[in-house]
Amino acid sequence: MHSPTATTLVLTDRPEDLARAGAMLAGGELVAFPTETVYGLGADATDPQAIAQLYAAKGRPRFNPLIAHVASLDQALALGEFPTEARVLAEAFWPGPLTLVVPARAGGPVCELARAGLDSVAIRVPDHPVAQAILQAAGRPVAAPSANRSGHVSASDARHVEEDLAGRIAAIVDGGATPIGVESTIVGCLGGVVTLLRPGGVPREAIEAKLGRPLETASADPGRPLAPGRLSSHYAPQHGVRLNATALRPGEAYLGFGSAEPGGAEPVARLNLSRSGDLAEAASRLYGCLRVLDSVPSTGIAVAPLPGTGLGEAIQDRLSRAAAPRETASSDASDTLAKS
Ligand code: TXA
Ligand code: MG
């Protein structure tokens, strides 16, 4: 484990740095790198020691499994059993912002700790050239949760990763801002049922069009979560978040969408996700805007109404998690408690 005072190397996206990042991962070290969704904190998915370090660096509970990232569908087939639907979705959306949860291949390389002991495995083939180069250099599946402290807002920029993880990990590869800005869509393909476990960068509508039928919805029962990490107070800034705000209360900061002006009090600070009402622009700006508004003293962050379709479903999901009451120590929000 890197001591809290250890320095974190900042690497560029030049080929020699990407080769070095891959070699560091293969050597069991923790390296953050950009994907097209958000920055991931990578560790060798086949090495339980590296995975244990990863959970510790993030402050993430070990019952929350990780996504294994590989460079191609061929490599993915070595990790899991792909039912027909999974194969169809992989061919349609990989490389890209889609994660598939499928039965883990017996004797497959992703270690049990990375799967949190489940007999399924979450797999993604990212499309970002930096991620692709690093995965190829590492030559093994790389587990990569979002590169933030557990319970915090995800990182869509190398600076966000530094804020959360500098001194706790070996290196950060700076590949600029991540183009999509929200995490991958997670679809479970288990037991003949295809379930939307987390809305994300691939809109539900695109997946349903490919499948020719609607996706099942994940269980809302917190005792039996289908995606163990989908705890309601995830993605949480320090300040309270209030959704669908059309009139501001005194002392609030304002996160707008579109050109409508809120009524009520003057905000202490204001940002807009997309003045033109473009959901892709809004997704790419979401976590950066939340981080900035969270750094301003306020009584809370009021968020304008947004559509819930297309990429709006993922944005709404993250915002409602940011707005949820904080959970207790049994959840991924243990950090949130620690800092409050
Ligand atoms: O865009 C993304 O998906 C980013 C980038 C870095 O790839 N990664 C990411 O990882 O968001 P993370 O760890 O923050 O979220 C992964 C989610 C967690 O909620 C976890 O519970 C769920 O995937 N998950 C992992 N394995 C699973 C499994 N076998 N069954 C159900 N859910 C699983
Ligand atoms: Mg995360």
Image (tube, rainbow, N blue to C red):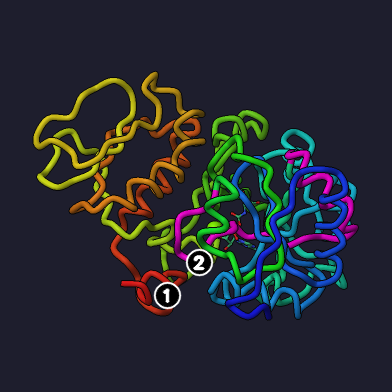
Q: Residue at x 84, y 46 (%)?
A: 133
- Quadrant of the rendered image containing residue 330: bottom left
Q: Residue at x 56, y 58 (%)?
A: 162
Q: Is residue 287 magenta?
A: no
Q: Which mark is residue 334?
A: 1
Q: Is residue 128 magenta?
A: yes
The boundaries of the magenta stretch are 127-155
Q: Is residue 90 left or right of residue 41?
A: right
Q: Residue at x 42, y 75 (%)?
A: 334
> Which quadrant, please, contains the N terminus?
bottom right
Secondary structure of the residue carrying tag 1 is helix
The foreground one among 238 and 98 is 238
Relative image position of residue 135 (x, y in whole percent):
83, 52
Q: CA distance from mark 1 to mark 2?
A: 8 Å
Relative image position of residue 301 (x, y in whole percent):
26, 47
Q: Is residue 75 left or right of residue 102?
A: right
> Which quadrant, please, contains the C terminus?
bottom left
The relative height of residue 53 versus residue 202 in the rendered view (above or below) is below
Specify the amino acid type for callout 1: Ser
Relative image position of residue 124 (x, y in whole percent):
72, 50
Q: Residue at x 30, y 32 (%)?
A: 256
The answer to whether the residue labelled 1 contacts the one labelled 2, judged by CB atoms less than 8 Å apart, is yes
Secondary structure of the residue carrying tag 2 is loop
Camera sees residue 303: yes
- The answer to whether mark 2 is within 8 Å of ligand 2 is yes
The foreground one among 27 and 99 is 27
Residue denoted by label 2? 150
How many marks on residues? 2
The relative height of residue 46 versus residue 82 in the rendered view (above or below) is below
